[in-house]
Amino acid sequence: MKRCRWVNLNNPIYVKYHDKEWGIESHDDRYLFEMLLLESFQAGLSWECILNKRENFRSSFDNFDYEKISKYDDQKINELINNKGIVRNKLKIKAAINNAKIFIDIQKEYGTFDTYIWSFTNNKVIESHDSFITHSNLSDTISNDLKRRGMKFVGTTIIYSYLQAIGIINDHDYACYLID
């Protein structure tokens, strides 16, 4: 079975992520926040590194419950900074809390984050099929809007990866068995 070129076939977590999750349309706000949090922690690191720590992130960040995360205090921040199972970057941890608050604000404005994020493409999947592109006009636009709202670690490359992950951009290689 041929997969996208970026998949490390020696890592079952990575293979499973590619086969069962990456590029599949998602409209679930909890999942959309999970991916946004994980992508923001990826900045400067590999996605494989983040995937390998995903379950530690899940337990450390209250199953990606953005309501709970938005209320984290200094004690929780210190706990996370000392957690060897996740990326212990204080700026990224604080950004996750900040971004959770803004995520909730966007939900209040649009009804759901899903409505907000999919509105940029009129609820349509963008076909690209070049998983090595790192940004686009779409990711530039969304990145700029999220930054304007106050989110951190949401540069255009992070947002492009995010859009791939949640299925807004279909970037499976033409040779990949998952191409429609």
Image (tube, helix red, strand yellow):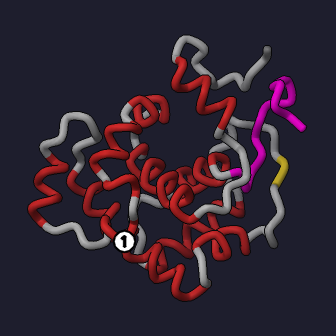
Residue drawn at (61%, 84%) of the image: 110
Residue found at the far bottom of this picture: 109
Quarter of the view holding residue 86: top left
Q: Amino acid at mark 1?
A: Glu
x then y, percent, for residue 63: 38, 52
Residue 109 locus on image (x, y percent): 56, 88
* Residue 171 lies in the magenta stretch: yes
**Residue farthest to the top, as pictured:** 10
Judge the density around disc 1: few (<14), some (14-19), many (≥20) Cα neighbours within 10 Å. Answer: some
Instruction: Give the magenta range.
Output: 167-180
When asked about the image quadrant of residue 77, the answer is bottom left
Q: Is residue 78 left or right of residue 24?
A: left
Is 5 placed above or below 10 here?
Answer: below
What residue would you read off at disc 1?
A: 67
Question: Magenta stretch: dominant SS?
Answer: loop
| Residue 129 found in image quarter | top right
Describe residue 114's horizontal placement relative to residue 84 as left or right: right
Horizontal side, residue 165 vs residue 1: left or right: left
